[in-house]
Amino acid sequence: MERITAQIGKDRYTTAITARKHRLISDEPEDMGGQDLGFAPQELFAAALASCTIITLRMYADRKGWDVESIAIDVTFDRDAAANVTRLERKIEFTGNLDQTQKERLKVIANSCPIHKTLTNPIEITTTVQ
């Protein structure tokens, strides 16, 4: 089980996030009262989908021996609070020698990355307070 820890002090809204031996900062943009010192939470959310997708695609293309020089992903995150709907749009661009059949297969593989599967299936969150 992955474990992520986060800690915030009195600085609005700078958060130190730790996973294994890695650390990053999350914050809100200045227009939300933060200091814009790191990714906003929704950006981290979209980044998880982008990085999982691109890693999964690279692993698959390498395993197949396909000529993929690079992969670029653009993910947008939009939250409609009134409708209680979150929209993620993922655009993938491949550089290399791929035919349309290979690109279509990679689209299927993109939808098979673990974060995509997590987001498209039920999620249970348990909260305890100490």
Image (tube, rainbow, N blue to C red):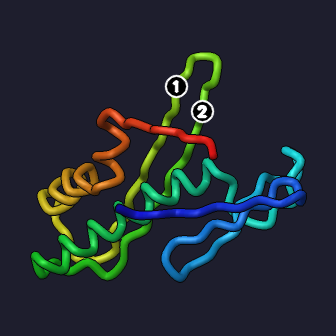
Q: Position of residue 102 (x, y in %)?
A: 15, 62
Vertical comparison of 114 with 3: above or below: above
| Mark 2 secondary-structure assignment | strand
- Disc on res. 125: none
Q: Residue at x 82, y 54 (%)?
A: 13
Are the residues at dot 2 and dot 1 in contact (C-beta closer than 8 Å)? yes
Cα distance in 3D space between marks 2 and 1: 6 Å
Q: Residue at x 89, y 47 (%)?
A: 33
**Disc on the earlier residue, 2 or 1:** 2
Vertical comparison of 85 with 43: above or below: above
- Disc on res. 79: 2
Q: Quadrant of the N terminus?
A: bottom left
Q: Residue furthest top?
A: 83
Vertical comparison of 108 with 119: above or below: below
Q: Position of residue 119 (x, y in %)?
A: 37, 42
| Mark 1 secondary-structure assignment | strand
Residue at label 1?
85
Q: Position of residue 67 (x, y in %)?
A: 20, 80
Query: Seen in the image, is 57 located left or right of residue 119?
Result: left
